[in-house]
Image: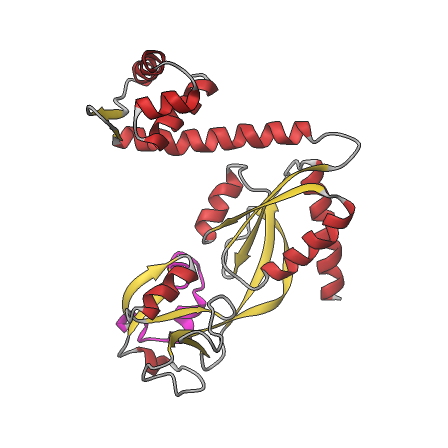
């Protein structure tokens, strides 16, 4: 299977038609059609459902698209790493994480490095812990920022100073908005929007479930999310109350949303992690040394 053909396949999947993909790739339509037919024969699977004007991916085609994107991303990352092996440190650093105010500490490190190594580029990937660790394990990310609780057994890690505070985002005209804080019983009779990580039961310890107590299963969870911005839109539209970390959703004076912390207080620690025995590019190694120095000073 050639990388060139995988790129052809991804272009066709993105464009939604062989004609559009052929124009984009500067190849003839018969040539592209033949390459795709050969790919289907090689895999022994039908990848497309063809019509007169468009194509639709089959389930096998969707699987190949996901895997092909990972392969192409990995090859592009590898090429960039080798191209950056010069006397002047440059290249790409790939960082993934959930939505957290701790990204400010990462941004401060990036800002300091920019002055000394302007040829380093940084690529941020947002997702929950499952998304981030999957990409870490496949080598698509150099570092991940994980919100506790998280399984750190496969990774080297550094504790990030400070903690994220959990609370509830709601409309300013909602019945609970007059309260200074939100207790467990306040959430029993309202529709709740939760992050998937907050209610995940696979960890040996689930801090949100422990905070809520024995009535956790009585919560009326009407929606789940992995990006708080999307959850805030649901709140604005009156879908429910979102359990989120502080400083992620806009609750300023010009917003119609407000944030109320949980009572008793619930906080989550954070870690920056990377694979054990990881071989870093020069750029990623430089970033790691800088983040280790900054965070170790912050902890002392």
* Residue 265 vertical position relative to residue 194 in the rendered view, above or below: below
**Who is closer to the viewer here, 133 or 106?**
106
**Who is closer to the viewer here, 7 or 27?**
27
* Residue sitting at x 45%, y 82%: 263
Residue 226 image-quadrant placement:
bottom left
Question: Which range is magenta?
Answer: 196-218
* Residue sitting at x 43%, y 65%: 206
Is most of the magenta stretch helix, strand or loop?
Answer: loop
Residue 181 sits inside the magenta stretch: no
**Who is closer to the viewer here, 17 or 243?**
17
- Counting from the top left corner in percent of width and height, residue 270 is at 57, 61
- Counting from the top left corner in percent of width and height, residue 106 is at 64, 56
Residue 206 sits inside the magenta stretch: yes
- Counting from the top left corner in percent of width and height, residue 300 is at 76, 66
Image quarter of the N terminus: top left
**Who is closer to the viewer here, 174 or 51?**
51
């Amino acid at each position: 299977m050639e990388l060139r053909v995988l790129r052809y396949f991804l272009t066709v999947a993105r464009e939604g038609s062989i004609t559009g993909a052929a124009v984009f790739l500067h190849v003839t339509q018969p040539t592209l059609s033949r390459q795709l037919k050969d790919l289907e024969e090689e895999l022994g699977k039908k990848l497309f459902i063809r019509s007169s004007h468009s194509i639709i991916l089959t389930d096998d085609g969707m699987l190949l698209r996901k895997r092909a994107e990972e392969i192409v991303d990995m090859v592009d990352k590898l090429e960039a790493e080798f191209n950056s092996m010069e006397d002047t440190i440059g290249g790409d650093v790939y960082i993934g994480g959930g939505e957290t105010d701790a990204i400010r500490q990462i941004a401060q490190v990036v800002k300091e490095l920019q002055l000394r190594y302007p040829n380093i580029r940084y690529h941020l990937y947002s997702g929950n812990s499952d998304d981030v660790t999957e990409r870490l394990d496949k080598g698509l990310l150099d570092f991940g920022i994980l919100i506790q609780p998280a399984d750190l057994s496969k990774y080297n890690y550094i504790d990030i100073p400070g903690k994220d505070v959990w609370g509830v985002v709601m409309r300013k005209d909602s019945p609970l908005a007059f309260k200074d804080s939100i207790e467990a019983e306040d959430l029993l009779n309202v529709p709740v929007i939760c992050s998937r990580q907050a209610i995940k039961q696979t960890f040996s310890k689930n801090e949100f479930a422990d905070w809520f107590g024995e009535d956790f299963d009585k919560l009326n969870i009407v929606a789940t999310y992995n990006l708080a911005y999307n959850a805030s839109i649901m709140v604005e539209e009156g879908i429910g109350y979102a359990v989120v970390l502080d400083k992620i959703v806009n609750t300023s004076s010009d917003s119609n949303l407000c944030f109320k912390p949980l009572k008793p207080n619930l906080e989550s620690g954070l870690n920056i992690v990377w694979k054990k025995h990881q071989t870093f590019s020069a750029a990623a190694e430089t970033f790691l040394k800088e983040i280790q120095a900054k965070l170790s000073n912050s902890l002392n």
